[in-house]
Amino acid sequence: MASPLATLPATAGAHLPVSLYADSESASTAVAHQIADLIRARAAESRPCVLGLATGSSPTRVYEELVRLHREEGLSFQNVVSFNLDEYYPMAPDSLQSYVRFMREYLFDHVDIRPENVHIPDGTVPVDQIAEFCRRYEEQIQEAGGIDLQLLGIGRTGHIGFNEPGSGPASRTRIITLDHVTRTDAASDFYGEENVPRRAVTMGVGTILEAHQIVLLAWGEGKAAVVKRMIEGEITDSVPATYLQRHPAVQVVLDEAAGAELTPRKTPWLLGLPCDWHDAALVRKAVTWLARTVTKPILKLTEEEYNENGLSELLAQSGPAYDINIRVFNELQHTITGWPGGKPNADDTYRPERAEPFPKRVLIFSPHPDDDVISMGGTLLRLVDQGHEVHVAYQTSGNIAVFDDEAIRFAEFVADYDHAFRLPGDEPADSLYHRVADFLKNKQPGQVDSDEVQQIKGLIRRGEAKSACRLAGVPDANAHFLDLPFYETGRVRKKPLGDEDIRLTMELLNRIQPHQIYAAGDLSDPHGTHRVCLAAIFQSIHQLKASGTPWLDDCWVWLYRGAWQEWDIDQIEMAVPLSPQELTRKRRAIFKHQSQKDRPLFPGADQREFWQRSEARNRTTAKLYDQLGLPEYEGIEAFVRWGF
């Protein structure tokens, strides 16, 4: 079992202790074993183990590991009593979005917990009985002896459970109105914000604070800002999670991405912590931070500014300032290239990509059918224009992200087309249209689409992807649709990555044998699909490498970010500049994805259209380079190289 990368104690600047892990997988496994140890210890004492349990994406891997421990190592849940944090209201227990169903699917149906020991807020209690239900829920917790360990996640508003901003430290189990941000974040689970319940039943902050021990989990860059406020900010009811600072036994468990904004990780020099100034990446991070802090180009930074901003040790070890400035400036300048596939017949000593071989076979992995053009459309266009053999692999069908009326429109088109051209066949297309229309007309909010509807929606997205490829100059034969099985549930919640997903990915890699691979390293994707798709690529490459696959010796992997977030400027290893004309061409390719235009079904926290987010991100990156004293461009797409 992996140990944390770092353990950050509570200090004057950090009010909660932190265990920081390399990734959510190792962190979740560690927490699951901690819970298992507690269950066994209580069983050895012939005592119940009372667990407070959470839902959402954060604890799912914890539950999967607990199930494995039960099945393979005999961990028994016979002595476990559980109390869940919350439930939407109203909510039927068998609904797709119900937390009752969530807990059954991830944990309760797979272990030997006694049904009478399971407690989850009831989303079906009549309104006039809610207050009594909540009072009784509190009593049941006390009758069980109090919660031994409470598992928590954290929302973007800083909520724990469904305790939204404004919830005080004395609040108890109650019905609450959900914040708009929380409802927006939940929209993907309900196939649209309009279907998200406006209320929920939740344990109160006071109830949570009475647990004997609390473990809070947070994964991904998207949680980094609120995690910083929780750990380093003052206690306030505008961020209810800050009340955890009053608890004597809280453990905050983070992956590297979620902890990226914490001062000891982001700017350790400000705390006087020891820094390895022989680490070129840390020096680059410090100098770019300093330039942005004092709003000056790198080459204009002075020794006084280094000293006044906690970087006197760097200056003493590597100074004078001019030398440090020149070195970091040159490193950043060398990331910029208009030849993402490598420039032939050129000295590539200071270029991010090799000159040879040329042209290269390039494989761009796109988790959804539009991530390629949204995230690296300008680079894709450059690679094609510069003569490389470009392939695009669409890892999932993206079928859940299509509005129902689009499916009806296309089914109707096929029926009209069939009628107009009198196509031969056993079944007229209009009968399919009527089946699809009838199903969607009677479809309930959150109901899984029929197989026919899923297939139509998948074909819509496939057609859009082909159209965008044609605009970019990618031949039809070079567009590959993997339709990885983990995705094909018809629901936002997916299956775990499986052997078939890896087999399909490895098969494509072996067929193309690329010199360059581009993959989405965007772990902030709120739906988790990017994370799973990246794992499929990494696992496939590791298996191929272990088997001695020779072509991998000449293959480089570049990671791009999606619509949600860009790489920090000190992390960027290849920056591809875009002209105004290239940004326009990229926009036209994004527009080919018409089902995602105007209003995507799952917009996430940002309500702008994908092309708007993409262009804003590209322009912001270019502006940062400009502010640091580097050449000014209309936009920049950024990449980080993954070594394997």
Image: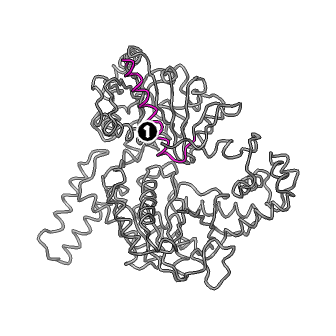
- For disc 1, the marked residue is 59
**Main secondary structure of the magenta stretch:** helix
Occupied quadrant, residue 486: bottom left
Instruction: Return the x and y of residue 591 as percentages of the image width and height.
Output: 46, 67
Residue 172, compared with residue 257, is above or below; it is above
Q: How many marks?
A: 1
Occupied quadrant, residue 126: top left
Judge by depth and name the residue closer to the eye, 451 or 276.
Answer: 276
Residue sitting at the far left: 426
Q: Count neighbours of disc 1 (C-alpha within 10 A) and say few if under 14, some if 14 to 19, many if 20 or more.
A: many
Q: Secondary structure at mark 1?
A: loop
Which coloring applies here?
one colour
Residue pictured at 66% horizontal, 35% vertical = 232
Q: Which residues are magenta?
A: 20-47
Residue pictured at 56% horizontal, 44% vertical = 258
Residue 402, compared with residue 358, is above or below; it is above
Instruction: Return the x and y of residue 382 as percentages of the image width and height.
Output: 56, 76
Residue pictured at 36% horizontal, 49% vertical = 492
Q: Is residue 592 left or right of residue 556?
A: left
Residue pictured at 38% horizontal, 45% vertical = 189
Q: Is residue 306 left or right of residue 198?
A: right
Q: Is residue 93 left or right of residue 222?
A: left
Residue 523, compared with residue 346, is above or below; it is above
Judge by depth and name the residue closer to the eye, 526 or 327.
Answer: 327
Residue 545, compared with residue 33, is above or below; it is below
Q: Is residue 348 magenta?
A: no
